[in-house]
Image (cartoon, rainbow, N blue to C red):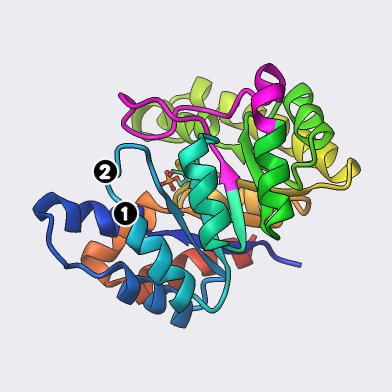
Amino acid sequence: MTAKLNVNIDHVATIREARKTIEPSIITAAVICEQAGADGITVHIRGDRRHIQDRDIELLREVVTTYLNVEMAATEEMIGIGVRTKPDAISLVPENPNEITTEGGLDVSGNLETLKPAVEKLRDSGVFVSAFVDPITSQIDAAQSIGIQQVELCTGEYAEMTLGAKAAHGEGSVRAAREVERIRQAAVHGTSLGMKVAAGHGLTYRNVGSLAAIPEITEFNIGHNIISRAVFTGLYKAVEEMIGKIRKS
Ligand code: PXP
């Protein structure tokens, strides 16, 4: 079975918010992604609302017919939004107001007391709960221990090794291969605990293949690279091409 693709459409909203206007519409974006074959739509509602707004979640909940995955920090405000809007899945992520993008996995083992009630609230409301973690056994164990149903493995370090000059040099490709193995082992571990395993962050048309070949990874969340390509090719084609890369592996 090939892995599913959820397209992260945050950066369609980034363009809209650059002018605080109504276009481009993330609703249109979500529909085009689904028509092009995406298995789901992912958005990240941040504390600073730099791209996705509260109303976007409400509208997407009504429009998305595949699978709506909402990333958020486990704050009281966000968990309230999750319980009220009930997306299909909520992915708990760490959030630092000064970061350009999510910088790494959530420290689940170091925050069990605050995360456990948040997970319980979400699960009680019928939402499937995922956590974005680094590919580290202890974090996966901690996630499982508080009822988190899926881990999304952070592929940021792998992605970094596949970029530009680093990828062109031997050391970069050796480290990328090492990171693929670390992600594979984490995926096997998560599956052995009965969890679903997803992956994402920094994935591109060029680097997704090695991870798509890992059978334990059942879902990818990919955004920036698809939206970047869509600027030149159109969103439908950009999504189709990414699906092609995942299925070929
Ligand atoms: N998964 C998580 C948990 C993320 O925070 C992000 C970025 O919002 C992504 C996946 C998508 O990353 P990218 O935009 O680099 O594809």
Image check: 56 left or right of 43? left
Q: Does 52 sit left or right of 231 as displayed?
A: right
Give the x, y percent position of residue 245.
54, 62
Q: Residue at x 42, y 73 (%)?
A: 33
* Mark 2 residue type: Arg
User: Of helix, strand and loop, which one carries label 2?
Assistant: loop
The residue tagged 2 is 50
Do the CB atoms of the residues marked 2 and 1 lie less than 8 Å apart? no
Which residue is depicted at the point 83% across and 41% down? 188
Seen at 58% across and 69% down, the residue is: 67
Quadrant of the drawing holding the N terminus: bottom right
C-alpha separation, residue under disc 2 versus residue under disc 1: 8 Å
Residue at horizontal 34 percent and vertical 27 percent from the top: 97
Q: Is residue 23 magenta?
A: no
Could you say whether the residue bearing mark 1 is in a helix, strand or loop? loop
Which callout, 2 or 1, points to the residue nearer the camera?
Answer: 1
Q: Which mark is residue 218?
A: none
Residue 55, compared with residue 158, is above or below; it is: below
Front residue of 49/138: it is 49
Visible in this render: residue 207? no
Give the residue pinned by disc 1.
53
Q: Amino acid at mark 1?
A: Gln
Magenta residues span: 91-115
Q: Is residue 110 magenta?
A: yes
Is 40 located above or below residue 74 in the figure? below
Q: Is residue 202 visible?
A: yes
Question: From what the image shows, is residue 62 above or below residue 23?
Answer: below
Q: Is residue 153 left or right of residue 82?
A: right
Q: Nearer the viewer, residue 182 or 248?
A: 182
Residue farthest toward the bottom in the current orientation of the protein: 35
Look at the image and tell me in which quarter the C terminus lies: bottom right
